[in-house]
Image (spheres, helix red, strand yellow):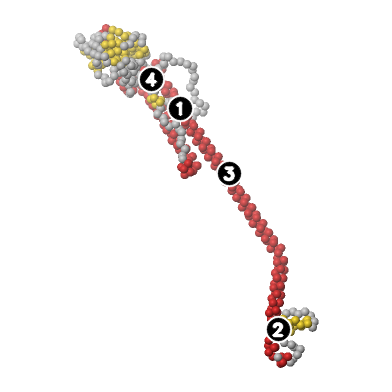
Amino acid sequence: MPHRPGSHYQHGGHHGHPGAARRAPAVAAARWADYTFLHAGHQLRLGPIAFWIVIGTLVIMAVWTISTATYFAFREDVLTRLIARQAEMQFAYEDRIAELRAQVDRISSRQLLDQDQYEHKLDQILRRQAALESRAAALTTLPDTTVTGSIRPAGRGEPARAAPYKPSPINDSGRITLPSEREARRLGVDGMLTRLQASLDRVESRQTATLNSIEESFDARARRIRNVLIEVGLSSARIPAAGLPAATGGPFVAARLPADPAAFERQVHRIGIARAQLDRLNRTLGAVPVRKPVLGEIDLSSGFGMRIDPFIRAPAMHTGLDFRGETGDPIRATANGTVTVAGWQGGYGKMVEIDHGNGFATRYGHLSAIEVNVGQSVKVGQILGRVGSTGRSTGPHLHYETRVDGEAVDPQKFLRAGARLGGIN
């Protein structure tokens, strides 16, 4: 241990008295561990415990001093590192926060974009639904059947009527049913929009199929009527004039398509034209005697052409058809026209003749009663008289003639043409 100048340190007994060890060996043994410090003639004696406490204190102070010196020596470097670390962590947190903000902005922008897209899709669906509803309303004005001149049986004294137009059996209005809230949650927004689109697709497909069916039906019926009219001798050049109605009028308003028409509007326009043409052909057909003058099955007693006369038994030309019947059975007009003869006409007995226009005329002979007058307009199926046996007749029957431009032609030619049209009695 270092000593200050002028001090003296002794360990053990008293060195100034050589006989001390010999005088008290036991006391020396007890004090061998004492520590004595000498300074300027002064002595400081410490016991072992006090000595080591002092030593320990000095060591601790030395260590503290060294540590403090080291701390202050490296304090600036440590602080610099800590500050740099804190700055790095702060920058990292700021970068992370900025990234999270950017991500939130992207999510918000995407949500807004998705919302705009969903609203756009929903708006398209609603517009399409409105268009389909409008189309359904337009389809209800289109008939699916047309008048072919068929005769509805009437009661005694009631004129028969032609079959009316029937509205199109279209029940699909184009309106869609939204799914329930539970199903909407299950499907999600995209699934719900897809399902609504599919529903509208099915409605549009059914409407298109209905339009195609109506257009094809009109075209097919128009072709059949034209063929029948040409077959009975009414040329295609005379059909337009023959189909003109007698009591119509009004200002001329040209039929035009809307600007930039869709396929639906164009097809509806074509159907409208086809319907108007079919109406004209039906009016023409109404003045052509292609129906039967009696109800029920035809029971001919004599046909058209050469035969043996029932009275003089000589060959003779039969200018019509003889229909068996009971006296009083109703006789009906086979086409629209005007009564030109209603009375007794020689061998015809009581006879009615009708002028149908376009060179067509029909005669109904051997009647027991006449129920029309000269100049009277008659409609298809209207009762003209009753079966009888007046004139040159051997029994109750109807003598029926068909004349074209005054010449008698076989009535079966007209009856067969009418049968091919279907639905004609």
Q: Is residue 347 above or below residue 416?
A: above
Residue wearing tag 3: 109
Label 2 crowding class (10 Å Cα cut-off): few <14, some 14-19, many 20+? some
- Spatial CA distance of label 2 from label 1 is 129 Å
Which residue is found at the position 50% from the left and 36% from the top? 125
Disc nearer the start of the sequence (4/3): 3
Circle 1: element type: helix
Residue wearing tag 1: 138
Label 1 crowding class (10 Å Cα cut-off): few <14, some 14-19, many 20+? few
Q: For marks 4 and 3, give the one nearer the viewer.
A: 3
Which residue is found at the position 31% from the left and 11% from the top? 371
Residue wearing tag 4: 282
Q: For marks 2 and 1, give the one nearer the viewer.
A: 2
Disc nearer the start of the sequence (4/2): 2
Q: For marks 3 and 2, give the one nearer the viewer.
A: 2
Disc nearer the start of the sequence (3/1): 3
- Spatial CA distance of label 4 from label 1 is 23 Å
Under mark 4, the amino acid is: Asn
Disc nearer the start of the sequence (2/1): 2
